[in-house]
Image (cartoon, helix red, strand yellow):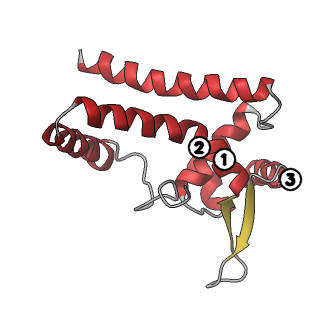
Amino acid sequence: MLERAFSDVYTKFKLHFYREIFRRINDREASLTAVETFCVEAIYSLGRPTVNEFATFMCISAPNAAYKVNSLIKKNYIRKVQSEDDHREYHLEVTQKYIDYYNISRSYIQEVVERISNRFSPEECEKLEEILSVVSQELMYEIDLPEHTNCEDEQ
């Protein structure tokens, strides 16, 4: 039961995102391929990785990662920013163009969270937040995220 419920929620978030992306593609608002979408989402979620960090996380070669990064730079979804500490190093950052693209799913998450807050008591919402935090921090240890990704900051 729990597995099915979790899978249904995850699937509904994915399907909503895919539907909105395809709607924008049909309206010519989006210019990313599916693979590019996955790449830029990973870059955003990793919180300013280097090209090598991105390549390592995605389990792809550095040249393949560089090719994907250059394509995303040309489309103005990401940019390379020189490190202040080590001027030989560059970090990947998403642009406002990507933030606008990302908000397709972000706004739906906010909508669902608002519905949860309206449907459940503050105590139940607090318990759900606690459960989700444990799932994210303790039970999904294969994926390390920065403390706070840019998601909350760039609204």
The mark total stands at: 3
Q: What is the distance, in whole Å, between disc 2 and disc 3 at their CAs?
A: 21 Å
Residue at mark 1:
100
Residue 111 x, y percent position in the rendering: 43, 35
Q: What is the distance, in whole Å, between disc 1 and disc 3 at their CAs?
A: 17 Å
Tag 1 secondary structure: helix
Query: Which numbered marker is on residue 74?
Result: 3
Query: Which numbered marker is on residue 103?
Result: 2
Relative to 149, 74 lies left or right? right
* Residue 125 visible here: yes
Residue 137 x, y percent position in the rendering: 30, 50
Nearest the camera: 25 or 14? 25
Residue 14, compared with residue 132, is above or below; it is above
Q: Which residue is at a point 71% across and 31% down the rendered structure image?
A: 34
Do residues under tags 2 and 1 come within 8 Å of each other at their CB atoms? yes
Q: Quadrant of the C terminus?
A: bottom right
Nearest the camera: 80 or 28? 28
Q: Which mark is first along the chain, 3 or 2? A: 3
Tag 2 secondary structure: helix
Q: Nearer the viewer, mark 2 or mark 3?
A: 2
Q: Which residue is at a point 56% across and 59% down the rendered structure image?
A: 154
- Callout 3, which amino acid? Lys
Q: Quadrant of residue 6?
A: top left
- Callout 2, which amino acid? Asn
Q: Which residue is at a point 79% across and 23% down the rendered structure image?
A: 26
* Residue 56 visible here: no
Q: Nearer the viewer, mark 1 or mark 3?
A: 1
- Callout 1, which amino acid? Asp
Q: Quadrant of residue 35?
A: top right
